Amino acid sequence: MARLLRLFALLLLLAFTSHPALARSKVPSAYDGHLETYVSDGRQLYPAHLYGVAIDWNKACNKGDAAQCLRLAGAFESGLGDIEADPRAAVGYYMQACKAGSGEGCATAARMLREGTPGYTLPALAQQQAERGCGALKYQPACASLAVSQATGAAKGTGSADSLLAGACSAGDDDGCRIRANTLFYTRGDPASRAEALKLFESACKARKSWGCLGLVDAYSNGWGLARDDARAADYARIGCEETRGEKLRLCTDHGRNLLATGNAKAIDKGEGILDASCAANDSIACYAIARWAIEPHRGGLTTLKEGYYYARRGCDLEFGQACTLLAAVYEGRYAHESQAEIALPLYERACRFKDQTGCDRAAALLRARPGLRGQIPAIDPSLPVADQLRRAKAAVDRGDRDAAIFTVVRLMDEGSEDADWLLGGWMYYGLSGAFGPERKGDGLILFENAARVGHVDAAIFMGMAYWYGEGVAEDHAKGENYMAIAAMKGSKMAEAILRSMKAEPIRQERARREKEAAEWREKHKNDWTFSWSTYTPTWTPPPSTYSPYTSTGPTVAQIYDNHNFNNAMDYYRGYTTACAVSNPYC
């Protein structure tokens, strides 16, 4: 229930946010032309697909306009309009910006090449980019990047890493201060170094920079450099999660856990939402925290027991041993679940491999109590990640071992896996010979919809089309749009395109209705004109004219656009969206 409610809360927010096409600045669009060009990614010439206005940015970049190179790099780094995110193209344009005189381009290219953002690392090239940015262009973030390379042994420069970091920090570079503080606090760790680092952490946290608050959380939680104070640690986690800029996943996980511990219903609901988001961002500790909250004796909140299984499985898939132990304990019968020791054993052993001693101890205890238990473990190992189990289940079906496949998929479905719902739903909907044949479309649709409701992209697209056209369900355009919006929100380009088409349907229908009405009007007046001449009698005093121009009986297309513009403007002024078209007269 909690996962479902949070997803629809996001969907509601999406409904109040205008489409990117309404943004004030023009974005690359395939409707405005396409160009395939090439940019060096540090290893080879790499193809870059440009659309619309980005073609002009590329021309300017090739002529040495660093700002336009940066603009293209940013578009490829995060995706913009019809340009899809592509880190290899991004690093290529950052390097072009560096060559054209942008210190920011040098620093960013150095970081990406050092950290492996494009899928590979090139330490020597990263050093060259950082040295140009720091030496020739005097850009302090590039000096900080060069210092990191030196500190990790990836490069050798003329100045020490310490002096480069100190200089960058003194010049006001945030990365320089962050790296310097972390080096002093975590790497050196002596009292004098930690005292200096704490000053940097405090200053940064006051400026609402997440790294500063995180340092203070660690300091107060562990008593490093000052007296342990859990209350102050919790407060800095709250500030870091709710009020700062920058990377704050760890901070939000800590804050979410602290909210659960308050016992306050409103705080618990908020904490569950934060942990759900952190788990979705692949924080295994967050997955474990919300799983434990749901599975152990319940103290309130919206997260259900089944959702607890889902989070425990996700944490285990992310290789957090305690999450594997928790899920194993469920199957052992320690919580509200029937005992299935043959499932618990491999999960405990997986936990043990990830250094959880409780998992090791319980696996050994099970084997002592039931020496033959290992021989009862299912053919498809239940400790494997969900994706691997489902792949093996499909392979089992192909070779005729349908019982093993169905057992695995049903078990994962009971753990709340939307992928299992999607697979089992397909077997039912299309009919799996020897198991679910003939087709059981109704049951399959139920599973498809279950998967769609919690954000499975393919299922959401399927149900969106089903409701739009009334295939297997009652036709409901609003539901169709909602499911398609879920898929679009999850990043499906196809769903975005379909949703745009769905949104345009009222305008298409109104245009068709107006065309039909106009055609009927023309035909009527043609008949009137023909009839008037068949009964024509001249007169010196013409009768009053009965002519009336064609008028639509419904809202015009212009009125529909006008209403949309007004609603968009209201959203813009109330802060529900930051985008409002230049052509919108109300903005």
Image: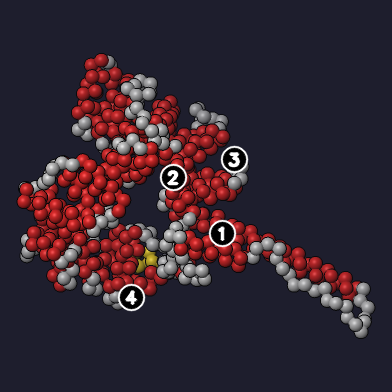
Between disc 4 and disc 1, the foreground one is 1
Q: Are marks 2 and 1 in contact (CB under 8 Å)?
A: no
On residue 60, the disc is 4
Task: Compute the Cα span from label 3 to label 4.
Answer: 53 Å
How far is disc 2 from disc 3 in space, using C-alphas?
24 Å
Q: Which residue corresponds to the image point at 73% horizontal and 70% vertical from the top-left?
A: 550
Q: Which amino acid is tagged 3?
A: Gly
Q: Quadrant of the N terminus?
A: top left
Position of residue 308 in the picture relative to residue 449 (left or right): left
The image shows residue 557 at horizontal and vertical percentages of 61, 65
Answer few, some or many: residues within 10 Å of disc 3's Cα (few below 14, many 20 plus, some between 14 and 19). few
**Type of the residue with mark 4:** Ala
- Which numbered disc flags the more N-terminal residue, 3 or 4? 4
Q: Nearer the viewer, residue 29 or 39?
A: 29
The circle on residue 504 is: 1
The residue positioned 18% from the left and 57% from the top of the image is: 203
- Residue 472 circle label: 3
